[in-house]
Structures are given as structure tokens and as C-alpha cells.
Image: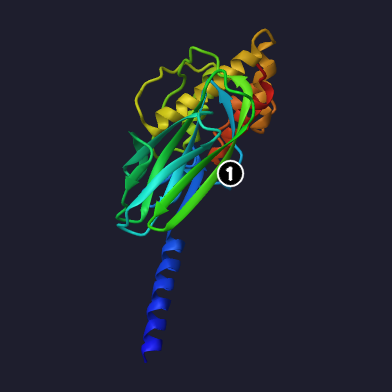
């Protein structure tokens, strides 16, 4: 009987550890896949297949941003670390996401490593990576590391630092779309100020998700405008329209924004791929 009792205890400990391991997870999504308080992608940003974030590109003098979803056992203390190799290659800021009407809204900067507990088993963060102006063009490794007790989960990212730089000073363009609109509506509003000649006063500053999405789209726009400098105005605008499935910029300006929020990332891909400093 004693042997069986010990076996039951050992099995229980093993089952508990296995359960903990299954509950502990960390995942990374693009900035355009806004995440709700339950850790799931918010309704307006669900269409299309989410990009797999494995080896994202980053430009110098610019920010690259992600949503980070940490799933832990409920009410269990956890710690989030950030590892870099090599150290100091990028500057990292982590923000705790606060929600409004079920949508991510205000961002509260936290110091790394950050400790917390999640009553519902989910914690959502925004990760900003800034690449210094004179950063070496190379691949670096950034790791999100989450610890609960003896268990660890690590989500590695291979950041590809590009030769291109974001021109300075950066001017914010475009308006902030409503919470119930796809996140890309804010990014496309920034693009439309150049592609379609729309004049919109940029309002709504501060540490908020949509403000940071507009900041990042304004970086893309600054790169595109630099690429287009000295060339026929329509040449680069039509190139941008083509990656969005339109024949010309004027044709694109008459179309609604794509339903897939990450369709906007085709514009960023084109800008990064084309720009060389």
C-alpha cells in the first residue's frame, strides 16, 4: 500500500508539472494583430492568416513593434525577461497593455525583467525595439523568456537589421481610426496622405497602441518619400499600389482598405526591400 501511495503522489506531481507546462506559453504577433484581454486577436483584426513572426526586418533609426501574449496558470507569479545576442544591438521597451471596450489602448511602460500575476491566465504586452542609427547590418537574436517556478518558455526572434534608415525628423501623418476599425485603417490613413493627397491633422499623441501604429506607418512613409525623391511623382506611388493589388495609385485611392489588416505590411516590405543607405 505504501508503494502505491508513493506512486500516486509521484504521478500527481508529474501531472501537476505537465499541466503547468501546458498552461505556460508566450507568443508574438505583429503590431496589426491587436489582442484582446483574453489573449485572442480582436475581431476587426482577425481576417486573413496572421504572419508568423520568426525573422522580422528592422530599419535603423526606427522602431519595430509586436504584441506579446503571455499565458500562465491563473494567479501564479511569473517573470518576463528579454535576452539579446549580442547585447546592446537594439534598445528594447516593454509596455503593459491596458484595454478600453475590449480593445488594447493605453500602454504603460514597465521595466525589464517584469514580474506579475494574471488572474485570468493571460497578460498582454507591447514590445518596441529601436535600432540605433549606426547599428551594424546583421542578424541578431532577441528572446522573450517567461518563467513560472521551475518552468520556462522562450520565444526567439531573429531580427534582420537592414541598411536603410528612417529619415529624420519624423513627421506624424494620418488620423487614428476608431477602435472598431481594423488596425491597418490607422496605417493606411498615414499612407493616403501621400498616395491620395489627403490632408489630415495628426491628433491623439501619447503612449497608445494606435498612436504607435501611426508612428511606425509614418516611418514607412518617410522611407517611401525618400525613395520617390527626384523621380516622377506617380512612379513610386504606382509601385506601392501594385503591391496592394491596384493598377495605379489613383485606382487604389478609390478602393476601400483591405479586410486583412496585415495587407499593409506589404507596403513596409516594399519600402525596406528597396531602401539602401
Q: Quadrant of the C terminus?
A: top right
Give the answer, above or below, for where 109 lies relative to 171: below
For the view shown, which residue lies furthest in the bottom direction? Answer: 1
Report the colour scheme.
rainbow
**Quarter of the figure that contains the N terminus:** bottom left
Q: Nearer the viewer, residue 46 or 166?
A: 166
Between 108 and 39, the one nearer to me in the picture: 108
Image position, residue 65 (x, y; %): 49, 34
Q: Position of residue 88 (x, y in %)?
A: 50, 29
Residue 110 vs residue 44: left or right?
left
Front in this rendered view, residue 107 or 237: 107
- The residue depicted at 32 percent of the width and 57 percent of the height is 76
Judge whether residue 198 can be spotted in this image: yes
Number of marks:
1
In this view, 253 is above or below 121: above
* Label 1 SS: loop
Q: Give the residue at mark 1.
A: 51
Categorize mark 1 by other alpha carbons within 10 Å: few (<14), some (14-19), many (20+).
Answer: few
- The percent coordinates of residue 119 (x first, y second) are 29, 55
Residue at the far front in the pictured view:
2
Residue drawn 38% across the image and 82% down it: 6
Vertical side of 124 occupied by 171: above or below: above
Residue 213 position in % (x across, y down): 46, 30
Q: Tell which residue pokes out farthest to the top in this image.
A: 230
- Residue 34 visible in the picture: no
Q: Residue at x 58, y 48 (%)?
A: 49
Q: Is residue 184 above or below residue 193?
A: below
For the point 39% across and 76% down, the residue is 12
Amino acid at each position: 500500500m505504501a508503494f502505491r501511495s508513493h506512486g500516486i503522489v509521484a504521478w500527481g506531481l508529474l501531472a501537476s508539472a505537465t499541466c503547468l507546462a501546458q498552461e505556460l506559453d508566450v507568443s508574438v504577433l505583429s503590431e496589426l494583430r491587436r489582442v484582446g484581454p483574453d489573449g485572442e486577436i480582436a475581431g476587426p483584426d482577425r481576417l486573413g492568416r496572421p504572419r508568423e513572426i520568426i525573422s522580422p526586418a528592422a530599419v535603423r533609426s526606427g522602431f519595430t513593434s509586436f504584441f506579446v501574449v503571455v499565458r500562465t496558470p491563473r494567479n501564479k507569479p511569473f517573470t518576463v525577461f528579454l535576452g539579446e545576442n549580442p547585447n546592446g544591438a537594439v534598445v528594447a521597451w516593454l509596455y503593459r497593455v491596458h484595454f478600453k471596450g475590449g480593445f488594447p489602448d493605453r500602454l504603460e511602460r514597465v521595466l525589464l525583467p517584469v514580474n506579475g500575476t494574471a488572474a485570468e491566465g493571460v497578460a498582454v504586452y507591447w514590445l518596441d525595439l529601436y535600432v540605433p542609427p549606426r547599428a551594424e547590418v546583421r542578424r541578431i537574436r532577441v528572446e522573450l523568456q517567461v518563467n513560472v517556478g521551475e518552468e520556462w518558455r522562450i520565444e526567439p526572434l531573429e531580427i534582420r537589421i537592414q541598411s536603410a534608415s528612417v529619415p529624420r525628423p519624423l513627421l506624424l501623418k494620418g488620423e487614428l481610426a476608431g477602435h472598431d476599425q481594423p488596425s491597418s485603417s490607422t496605417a493606411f490613413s498615414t499612407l493616403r496622405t501621400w498616395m491620395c493627397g489627403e490632408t489630415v491633422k495628426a491628433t491623439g499623441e501619447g503612449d497608445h497602441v494606435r498612436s504607435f501604429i501611426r508612428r511606425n506607418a509614418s516611418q514607412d512613409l518617410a522611407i517611401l518619400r525618400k525613395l520617390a525623391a527626384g523621380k516622377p511623382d506617380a512612379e513610386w506611388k504606382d509601385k506601392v499600389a501594385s503591391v496592394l493589388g491596384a493598377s495605379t495609385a489613383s485606382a487604389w485611392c478609390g478602393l476601400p482598405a483591405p479586410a486583412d489588416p496585415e495587407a499593409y505590411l506589404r507596403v513596409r516590405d516594399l519600402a525596406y526591400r528597396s531602401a539602401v543607405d
